[in-house]
Amino acid sequence: MTDINGILLLNKPAGITSFKALGNIKKLLKEEQGEKVKVGHTGTLDRFAEGLLVVLTGKFTKLNPVFTDFDKVYEAEIKFGVSTETLDPEGKITETCMPPDIEIINEKINDFRGKISQRPPIFSAVHVDGERAYKRALRGELKELPVREITIYEFEIIGWEKPYLRCRIHCSKGTYIRSIARDLGKACGSCAHLTELKRLSVGPFSTDCGVSDTEFNPKTDLITGRSVFHRITEFNPGLFRLAEVEEKSVSWIRTGKELSDDLFIDKLSEDGKYAIFSNGMFLACITKTSGQYSYIFVAA
């Protein structure tokens, strides 16, 4: 039986929701496993947007916080001179104005690099009092969301055909490219909204290795076990370390019994998070803190 505990790099097309993009994945995994498999993604892409969705399956869904912390790279198209209610092409037009010249855009983009404050769109998946912001916005109960600090590592112009700006943005988690379009438009003395968006990468994972939901094959397209953690540790060496146990310890760990130093082939000398393996087989994620061990989850 195929190991269904892993990640899938899914290239979502424009025009469907992130939730719908997972439909065929869930169906094929259920057929492969003979039962329903837990599936989730690590960051919503709006319906008009396309690109990389990192999909977690089985026990790996418990690693969601690790993947949502990764920075991301986008390619976007911004239209100046028109703003919309949702800050994207699907919303009602709320304002029209003169688009700026490229010289002004070039100047103002400097204010959108490094650490900046950003207000997320009210039509977003941000939680407000336990409910998605967009649901409250649709009922007219929400006017704005709190400002948050984000980091823009790179903001590069790759094309300009007035009033359309094409750009590439490398940013931290929690960044809304729709808000960047809105705020850049205002900074230029104009208005703007996002017309196209493509997510190119999430941490060490990119669209180059992605598959569509119709091409997905559970036997070949899931990245499992050691391969996942090698990619993560190459990108961020301090996030996880890899550790090995002998085969006789497999059942001990799989049943969640108490961990101790003598279980590991090489002593785990440092505190931190560890992915545990035996002869290449992924067993569990654990944490060592002040010499004490605890499980994050077991891949039984």
Image: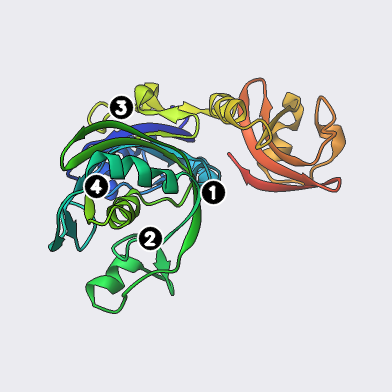
**Secondary element at tag 4:** helix
Distance from Cα at disc 2 to Cα at disc 3: 30 Å
Q: Are marks 4 and 3 in contact (CB under 8 Å)?
A: no
- Mark 2 — residue? 120
Distance from Cα at disc 4 to Cα at disc 2: 23 Å
Please name whichever residue, 23 or 117, is drawn nearer the observer in this view of the structure.
117
Q: Are marks 3 and 1 in contact (CB under 8 Å)?
A: no
Distance from Cα at disc 4 to Cα at disc 1: 22 Å
For the residues carrying marks 4 and 1, which lies nearer the camera in this image?
1
Earlier in the chain: of badge 1 and badge 2, it is 1
Please name the residue shown 36% across and 47% down the image: 108
Answer whether residue 38 is visible to the viewer in this image.
no
Please name the residue shown 45% across and 65% down the image: 147
- Mark 4 — residue? 20
- Mark 1 — residue? 65
Q: Are marks 4 and 2 in contact (CB under 8 Å)?
A: no
Earlier in the chain: of badge 3 and badge 1, it is 1
Q: Is residue 143 left or right of residue 249?
A: left
Please name whichever residue, 147 or 48, is drawn nearer the observer in this view of the structure.
147
Coordinates of residue 285 in the picture (x, y in percent)? 65, 40
Distance from Cα at disc 1 to Cα at disc 2: 20 Å
Q: Is residue 192 above or below residue 220?
A: below
Amino acid type, callout 1:
Pro
